[in-house]
Amino acid sequence: MEIKTFFLDTYALYEIIEGNENYIEYTKNVAIVTTKINIMELFYGLLIKYNEKVADNFYEKFLPYCTGIEDNVIKKAMTFRALNKKRNLSYVDCIGYIIAKQRNIKFLTGDKEFEYMENVEFVK
C-alpha cells in the first residue's frame, strides 16, 4: 500500500480532530509533515474551544511530525506572501506552503485563499 505524504496546515489538523468526514482519507496510510507554529495555532484554538488538557494532548500527538523552519524557507515564504498580498495569507500558512513545495508534497488545507493554487490539496 502506497503511503502519501502531505503537509497539514492548522486548518487540516483541526478538521481531522473535529472528525470532518472529508478528512478521513488523510488519517490512514498518510505521512504527516507540519511545523511547531502550526501546532502552536492548533493548541490555541483547542485551548479556547475545549481546555488545556485537550490542547496539550493534541500538541504532543502532532509534535513528532514537526519539521524545522530553515532561514531560506522564511525568506521564500515572505516573498510568496508579498507576491500574493491581495490574498489574506497568514505567515504560518505561507511557511507551510513553501515547505510543501520544497519537499514536493501537497499542502493540505481548507483555507479558501489556497483553493486554486498549485501544489494544494483543497478539502472543505
Image (cartoon, grey):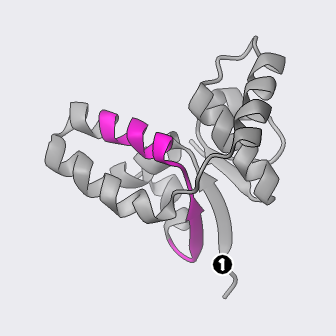
Q: Which residue is under mark 1?
A: 3
* Residue at screen point 56% across, 41% down: 124
Work out whether residue 4 or residue 72 is closer to the camera in this orientation and state it: 72
First to last magenta residue range = 28-44
Residue 110, x across and y down, in percent: 58, 39
Does residue 87 appear to the left or right of 63 in the view shown? right
Which corner quadrant of the image does residue 2 belong to? Answer: bottom right
Badge 1 density bin: few <14, some 14–19, many ≥20, Cα 10 Å:
few
Work out whether residue 97 or residue 50 is closer to the camera in this orientation and state it: 97
Work out whether residue 86 or residue 63 is closer to the camera in this orientation and state it: 63
Does residue 35 appear to the left or right of 102 in the view shown? left
Instruction: Looking at this view, name the residue that lies furthest to the bottom.
Output: 1
* Residue at screen point 32% across, 34% down: 45
Does residue 119 appear to the left or right of 8 in the view shown? right
Does residue 51 appear to the left or right of 2 in the view shown? left
Q: Is residue 1 above or below residue 14?
A: below
